[in-house]
Image: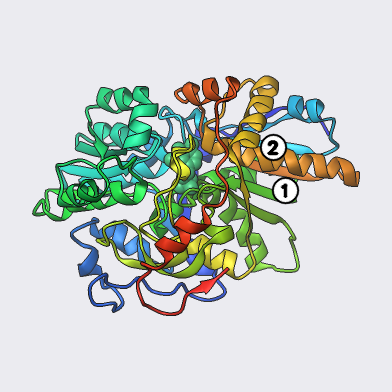
Amino acid sequence: MSDQTKFNLTEADIPTAYYNIAADLPTPLPPPLHPGTGKPLGPDDLAPLFPMELIKQEVSAERYIEIPEPVRDIYKLYRPTPLIRARRLERMLDTPAHIYYKYEGASPAGSHKLNTAIAQAFYNKQERVRKLATETGAGQWGSALSMACNFFGMDCEVFMVKVSFNQKPYRRILMETFGATVHASPTDLTKSGRSILAEHPDSPGSLGIAISEAVEVAVTSGGACKYSLGSVLNHVLLHQTVIGQEALRQMDLAGEYPDVVIGCVGGGSNFAGLAFPFLRNTLVSPDGKDTRFIAVEPTATPSLTKGAYTYDFGDTVQMTPLVKMYTLGHTFVPAGIHAGGLRYHGMAPLISALYNQGYIEAVAVPQNPTFAAAIQFAQSEGIVPAPESAHAIRVAIDQALDAKVCGQQRVILFNLSGHGNLDLSAYEQYLGGKLEDYEYPAEEVARAMEHLPRVGEAAPA
Ligand SMILES: Cc1ncc(COP(=O)(O)O)c(C=O)c1O
C-alpha cells in the first residue's frame, strides 16, 4: 500500500442522487403522528412547516432521489470533501490501526450542515417561500442556513440557544454577515419563548425551546415563512448521504473498507450521512460486511444510551409532530456543555430504529476526555475540531488503542463534521482546567420522562 494521505475526488464525482435508507430498512419506520389528534400525519399537516418537495422526501420509499443541478452547482464550492488518512495520529498513538476521516469542516460554513441547508433553501425557493426560520445550538447550523438563504436571495431568522449565544459570539456575527436576524432563545418575541421565561427567567435555552420559537414564527406567517430543521428528520439525513457516498469511493481509492464507522450524534445527521451508504452494504448483503457503526453522544445528553424508544415531541412546547425516537423527554434541558450541537433530547427516527434493531451501537463520553482527544488530534493532524466532532475523535482514538492491545490492523473511519476555529473559548476553558464533566442527569431525565405523551408503549433502554 502507498503512503498516500489524502484521497480526493473531482467535481464530476459529486453524487448525483441522495441515498434514501428508508428503501432498505428491514421494517418500515413507525409513522409520525399529529400532535393534537395522535393520528398519523398527512402531507397537508406538514404544509405550514415545509415545502411539498421536502414533505415528499420525508415519506419517500425511493432508494435514490436526484440532486437538483443548482444544488450540485453550489456543492462545487467545497465538494467532494477530502478523505484523509490520519497517519500522524496513528504514529502518535503507535497503533497498527488505519484511521481515516472525512473532513466536512472543509465547507465554507465550517461543517456538514451546509449539505442540507443548500438543498432546503433550494426547495423552499422553488415553492416561492420568502423566509426560513430555524433554531441553532452552537451556531453551525444557523450559519449554514444563513449562507444558503443568502445564496438563494431569501431571509433567514435564527433562534440561537442562549447559552451558546453567549459562549460563541463570533457565530452570531457570521450569521449576520450573511444577512440573517439572530435572537438569543428563549426570547420574548414568541408565545413559546414567553411561556418558558415566565417559569424559568434564567433559562439557558435548549434546542427543544428554540425549535418551538422557530416553528411558531413559521406557522403564524401565513405561508411567507417556513421552518427549517438542521437534523433529526428523514429528509435532512437524506441530504447528508453525499458524505458517505463520496467516502465509499474514497475508501476504494485507499484500497480499504472500514471495520468501524464512527460519528458524533446530536440529532444524528452527520453520523447518518457518513454511515448510511456503508450500512446499505450490510443491510443488502448481511453476510458480506460486518462493519460496526458507532454513534457517539455526550454523557450530558445520552438519548440513545439512556433514553426510552417511544413517541415524543421534537420540541419543548409540543408544537411539532410526534415521532418515535430515543428520547430523554421533550422538557429535558441539557447541561450547558460546549458541544452545543449535541444538546438535543431526541434522536433521528431512522437512527433510533436502526439502533433498536441492533444495526448501530452507541457510546456516551464526557466532556473532558473528549477535549483531550481533540487536542491530540489537533496536535497531530493540525485541525482544531468542533467540540461536537471531537466526540467521534474520542471513540476513534479509543478504537485505535484497543486495536493496539488486540494487535489488529483495524480500519477506522470517522466523520470530522466540522472545525472548531470559532469554538476556541471552549478550548481556553479546557486548557485552563475549567471544564466540568456532566454525568447522566438521572433525576432530571426521570422528571422529563413524566411528561412523555401517552402514545404507544415506552420501553426504557
Ligand atoms: C460540527 C457539528 N457536528 C455535529 C453536530 C450534531 O448534529 P448532527 O447529529 O445532526 O450531525 C453539529 C450540530 O450543530 C455540529 O455543528
Along the viewing direction, whichever of 282 and 438 lies nearer the viewer: 438
In the figure, is residue 339 to the left or right of 149?
A: right
Counting other residues with Cα less than 10 Å from the Cα at mark 1, is it few (<14), some (14-19), or many (20 or more)? many
Q: Which mark is on residue 293? A: none
Amino acid carrying mark 2 in the image = Tyr
- Residue 101 drawn at (x, y percent): 64, 36
- Residue 205 drawn at (x, y percent): 33, 43
Secondary structure under tag 1 reads loop
Q: Residue at x 74, y 28 (%)?
A: 89
Q: Residue at x 36, y 67 (%)?
A: 451
Q: Which mark is on residue 100? A: 2
In the figure, is residue 287 to the left or right of 362?
A: right
Q: Which mark is on residue 258? A: 1
Visible in this render: residue 115? yes
Amino acid carrying mark 1 in the image = Pro
Mark 2 in CB contact with mark 1 (< 8 angstroms): yes
In the figure, is residue 88 to the left or right of 183?
A: right
